[in-house]
Amino acid sequence: MDNLQDRQNSDNKSTFPVHFVRREELHAQDEQAWTDKGNAAAQRGDYEAAADAFDQAVAINPNDARARYNLALAQQYLGETELAVAGYRRAIDLDPQLIDAYINLGNLYGELGLYEESLETFQQALELEPENDELYLNVGDAYRAQNLFQDAIQAYRQALILNHDNHAAADNLLDVRERVNDQWRRLMEQEKRVDADPADPTRYAELASIYLDMRRYDDALSLTNQMRMLNPEGRSAYDMLAVVYEQMGERDQAADIYAQIVEIDPQDAEAWEHLGTWRSLQGDSEAAIDAYAHSVQLDPMRITSRFSLAEAYLEAERYDEALTVYQGLIERGESLLQDDDIAAAYAGLADTYNSLGRSNDAIDASKTLLGRFEDDPEGYYQLAIAYEALGRFDDAIENYQNAIDTDPLNGEYYSDLAAILCKVKRYEEGLEYVQQAIAMDPTLIAAYEILAQIYEETGRHEEAQVALGQVNTLKSASEE
């Protein structure tokens, strides 16, 4: 995907000074002054000063979408990618017509490898500007990054229909064509290998893998059926079938296939772990626990299964068992775990202590985690939960904020901070954070509940009813 700054500076479109435009109508003279200072700093290339100025403009008028956008763009140029994402999301929430915010947000999602979110953002922008060839270029790039080549081709073609001189679209279309041709060459070569020995199931598996790369799921499924006919008792067909269903996201079929695999080979710890994953996705936590426990019993050194088992215990509210697993992971320590695993084990331990109401133990675990990994957001988050349970609200608020600072993309952090701010009657601050939570995750039911509570407490009863209506809508959708 093209670099965002390069894209903005190409063809004299959307350069930094052009994006930081002055608004004709401002709610306060001071806001205009800070906006002017930010624009001037951006013109000089001093993006830190620009960010500071735009931050002041946001503080004066938190509901100004353009001020939010300007701050996010300055943060983007400073490399503060996640803060910029959060800012663009809030700007769009305030002004759903702010097309520049969609474009920059989509590109940032691409830089973070969040290609589905990138694609969704560009599609939303296209609803606003369906004749924008640059947006179709961005959509094509997002499809290309996911190897969805036919969709990418259609997007690049549309960009060229709208603007025949869009050279980036033409170049990227050529690149995708080469990739598609390469896939077809591989496909034909493997077809010949199958023809040379049609009794060899492994050759069908390799061919099915190519079909999966091409998103031709029906063809891949057909080949797995041929493999099963050739070797009904063999594993290879079931393994390939599991891969196909996993890639398709068919959780029930994937779970059924892994259940068959562990019947064929009950000593396969990895297959038991996969079965646990899909049982969990089905919402069958007890079956997931049984599968993960089998995996751990077969291979006690299988760390991923141990973490999955602990998380499944937490989800099932079997806290004492979760605690035992996390303590066991920590006891193994340096000899077995990588740094990320150690951090996750302490975070899980703190989470379990909080769930058990053992707040002081949760504080100790969180502080141990933060002592080793200073910027771990989950450490701050669990510490905040523990402080809140003890009634130490100022400490809780500080650590919720720390969690947000280290992970600005987690909507739950904003929502929980808003809840405690509401508890201490700091409603305006709580409103700001809960609105940011909703901007980050519009499906977060708890955030709408907090929003309704804040509106009710501040006498905005009609808005409270609207928020409660959204709660009911989301709950109904979740049940369906």
Image: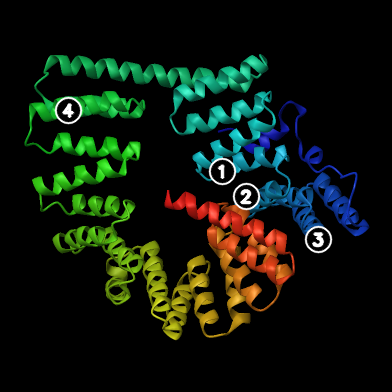
User: Which residue is denoted by mark 2 in the rendering?
Assistant: 85
* Residue 230, position as x, y percentages in the image: 8, 26
Sequence-first disc among 4 and 2: 2
Mark 2 closeness class: few <14, some 14–19, many ≥20 residues within 10 Å: many
* Residue 301, position as x, y percentages in the image: 21, 62
472 and 281: which one is in front?
472
Q: In what element is the residue under mark 1?
A: helix
For badge 2, the amino acid type reads: Val
Sequence-first disc among 3 and 2: 3
Mark 4 closeness class: few <14, some 14–19, many ≥20 residues within 10 Å: some
For badge 4, the amino acid type reads: Asn
Q: Which residue is drawn at 30% across and 60% down?
A: 308
User: Which residue is denoted by mark 3 in the rendering?
Assistant: 56
Find out whether the residues at labels 4 and 2 contact each other: C-beta distance under 8 Å.
Answer: no
Find out whether the residues at labels 1 and 2 contact each other: C-beta distance under 8 Å.
Answer: yes
For badge 1, the amino acid type reads: Tyr
User: Which residue is denoted by mark 4 in the rendering?
Assistant: 225
Compute the Cα span from label 1 to label 4. 38 Å
Determine if residue 170 is in view. Answer: no
In-image side of 353 versus 452 (left or right): left
Q: In what element is the residue under mark 4?
A: helix
Q: Which residue is drawn at 75% across and 30% down?
A: 13
User: Which residue is denoted by mark 1 in the rendering?
Assistant: 109
Sequence-first disc among 1 and 4: 1
* Residue 389, position as x, y percentages in the image: 51, 81
